[in-house]
Amino acid sequence: MAYDHQNIFAKILRGEIPCTKVLETAHTFAFRDINPARPVHVLVIPKGPYITWTDFATLASPAEQTDFVRAIGEVARLEGVTETGFRLINNNGEDGHQEVPHLHVHLVGGASAGPMLRRAEG
Ligand code: DGP
């Protein structure tokens, strides 16, 4: 699947849609989710045109990958959830229920994330 340069996060990266920025680094951008599921709900995205984790793992440079991993840790620190804990969620593709086709990691915290996914019935 080709990257869609008109997806919402591409527009946010270009400044065409407003957002509440949390962190910006050389290769990574972090902003608050429009529909927060917990008191802290930040989306961390690479600036490059990657749709899924697989794209990012295979196509991104080591500098981009390192920057992304470090930025997620920095967002946790900035949001004050390093000690209390947080959950990282990354939805990929159809089965992952990915809505926006630009790689993003949800960092949620500030309250219990609840238990892990339950096994699907049937
Ligand atoms: P996912 O289902 O993993 O693809 O999550 C997409 C998330 O993106 C969802 O939690 C809501 C968030 N979102 C969608 N549109 C916007 C937007 O325009 N601004 C912001 N800040 N977040 C958005």
Image (tube, rainbow, N blue to C red):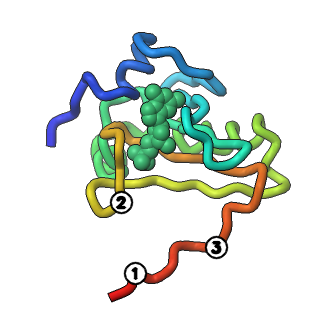
Q: Is residue 23 above or below residue 83?
A: above
First of labels 3, 2 by sequence position: 2
Q: Name the residue tied to disc 3.
A: 115
Q: Is residue 106 left or right of residue 97?
A: right
Rendering quarter of residue 15: top left
Residue drawn at x 35%, y 37% is: 102
Residue drawn at x 15%, y 36% is: 2
Q: Residues within 10 Å of mark 3 (few under 14, many from 20)?
A: few
Residue 63 seen in render: no
Rendering quarter of residue 120: bottom left
First of labels 2, 1 by sequence position: 2
- Which image quarter holds the C terminus? bottom left
Question: What is the C-alpha distance between the residues marked 2 and 1?
Answer: 13 Å
Rendering quarter of residue 1: top left
Ligand 1 within 8 A of label 2's CB? yes
Numbered badge on residue 2: none
Q: Name the residue tied to disc 1.
A: 120
- Percent of width and height locating residue 110: 77, 49
**Amino acid on which disc 2 is placed:** Gly
The one nearer the camera, 48 or 30, is 30
Ligand 1 within 8 A of label 1's CB? no
Residue drawn at x 58%, y 54% is: 88
Q: Name the residue tied to disc 2.
A: 96
